[in-house]
Image (tube, rainbow, N blue to C red):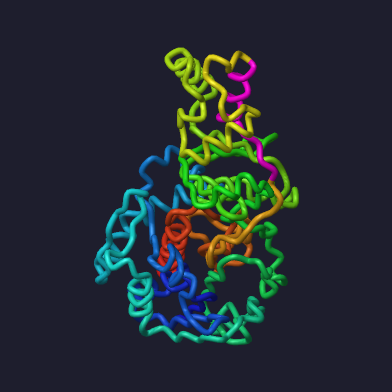
């Protein structure tokens, strides 16, 4: 009986295991997990509700969802798509619902339904918790009956590495001479040392946000917190600019377009307001929430009692610039809840994109976040785990 080792009992590892057992019931699958629980990260993702995939509505190019790994994911989604994900889980007793943010959640809004479904699908595997893998090595033997791989000294016919983010490195792969991309954090919030801004904590506005001096931009709901910025717009930007920010020590200048509108249109709108309301105080014309509007008027250097008729061309220029490109210093990052995603890992040049089998070492496969694939928030990272885990299972079954 062929023996398969899967390293890491996260989303990709468990999904790969489940599909190995389903596609080839005669296989012997051993699932290694260094921690005390399988699927620990899945249990807390989406605030404990598990946004297990996304409809991809509004995604014009996969690079918008996958800053790293777009080409591999384009191929992977053709093999196992978001529709396939929904069908897989619903077919195994987890009814799903699509929310306004295009994320698919369990109807129960309970991530444990997803965890229980996957663990049930993995029944039949030898799941070894609290068992870190110290060594993966090819067998150098001419004995044809000997399995080609050893994991912790134990023989296996195929090995799948699904260890997730590689913050601690991959010491058990060092002897295989693979190309690794140094890991850096992705999906984090921004620390902004501006007390006038952080006093507005709790406010949410649809905005555009970018990094000055770069082409990195995002938009969406922007949340002001007591430490700076969070919300979908911030998380997307942190994903797009993950490596740039790491290289620059998480320092820089953030630019915020508070109306998420081109500068010329903002100027035209302000000009029309000035023409229609010359004697009205600008502070009473709220284009945004009152406290935020007052903050931006102060930032533009305008008096609280100034009227539209007094604004003049210089004042108009300052207010337009403030609304379209307010600058805030970036002084660091903060972790996003309990969730953690890394950019980096096993370089995609190491694997065949169709099978995710290692080019240099046949019989060795990679799936999930251990690969240099990562995504913005919204279920895209879990979809990458499902798709790549499925491909590895399918590839192994075919190879045997």
Span shown in magenta: 314-329
Compared with 278, 37 (above or below) is below
Does residue 317 belong to the magenta stretch?
yes
Quadrant for the C terminus, please. bottom left
Quadrant housing residue 311? top right
Residue 141, how many percent across, how many down?
65, 81
Residue 284, how many percent across, how many down?
47, 30
Residue at figure coordinates x 62%, y 51% from the top left: 190
Does residue 197 belong to the magenta stretch?
no
Compared with 316, 187 (above or below) is below
The answer to whether any part of residue 71 appears in the image is: no
Instruction: Identify the main secondary structure in magenta.
Output: helix
In the picture, measured across the screen, residue 364 lies left or right of residue 327, that is left
The answer to whether any part of residue 98 appears in the image is: yes
Residue at figure coordinates x 58%, y 38% from the top left: 295
Pick whichever, 148 or 333, lies toward us: 333
Residue at figure coordinates x 47%, y 21% from the top left: 280
Residue 345, how many percent across, how many down?
63, 61
Residue 362, how many percent across, how many down?
57, 67
In the picture, measured across the screen, residue 133 lies left or right of residue 204, that is right
Pick whichever, 165 or 245, lies toward us: 245
């Amino acid at each position: 009986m062929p023996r398969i080792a899967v390293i890491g009992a996260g989303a990709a590892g468990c999904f790969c295991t489940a599909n190995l057992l389903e596609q080839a019931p005669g296989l012997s699958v051993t699932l290694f997990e260094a921690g005390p629980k399988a699927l620990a990260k899945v249990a807390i993702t989406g605030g404990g509700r598990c946004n297990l995939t996304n409809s991809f509505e509004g995604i014009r190019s996969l690079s918008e969802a996958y800053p790293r790994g777009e080409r591999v994911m384009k191929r992977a989604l053709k093999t196992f798509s978001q529709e396939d994900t929904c069908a897989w889980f619903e077919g195994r007793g987890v009814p799903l619902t699509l929310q306004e943010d295009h994320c698919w959640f369990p109807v129960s809004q309970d991530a444990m339904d997803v965890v229980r479904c996957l663990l049930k699908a993995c029944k039949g595997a030898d799941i070894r918790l609290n068992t870190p893998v110290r060594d993966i090595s090819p067998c150098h033997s001419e004995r044809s009956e000997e399995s080609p791989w050893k994991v912790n000294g134990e023989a296996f016919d195929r090995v799948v590495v699904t260890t997730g983010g590689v913050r601690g490195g991959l010491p058990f792969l060092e002897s295989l001479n693979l190309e690794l991309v140094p890991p850096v954090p992705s999906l984090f919030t921004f620390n902004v040392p501006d007390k006038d801004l952080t006093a507005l904590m709790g406010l949410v506005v649809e905005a555009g946000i970018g990094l000055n001096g770069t082409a990195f931009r995002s938009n969406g709901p922007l949340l002001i917190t007591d430490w700076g910025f969070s919300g979908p717009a911030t998380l997307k930007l942190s994903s797009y600019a993950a490596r740039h920010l790491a290289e620059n020590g998480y320092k820089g200048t953030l630019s915020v377009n508070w109306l998420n509108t081109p500068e010329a249109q903002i100027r035209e709108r302000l000009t029309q307001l000035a023409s229609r309301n010359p004697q009205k105080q600008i502070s009473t014309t709220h284009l945004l929430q009152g406290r935020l509007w007052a903050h931006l008027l102060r930032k533009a250097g305008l008096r609280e009692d100034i009227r539209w008729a007094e604004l003049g061309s210089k004042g108009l220029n300052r207010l337009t610039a403030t609304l379209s490109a307010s600058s805030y210093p970036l002084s660091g990052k903060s972790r996003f809840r309990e969730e953690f995603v890394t950019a980096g890992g096993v370089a995609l040049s190491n694997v065949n994109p169709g099978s995710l089998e290692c080019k240099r070492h046949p019989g060795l496969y990679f799936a999930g976040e251990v690969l240099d694939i990562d995504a913005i928030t919204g279920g895209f990272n879990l979809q990458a785990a499902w798709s790549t885990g499925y491909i590895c299972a399918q590839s192994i079954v075919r190879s045997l």
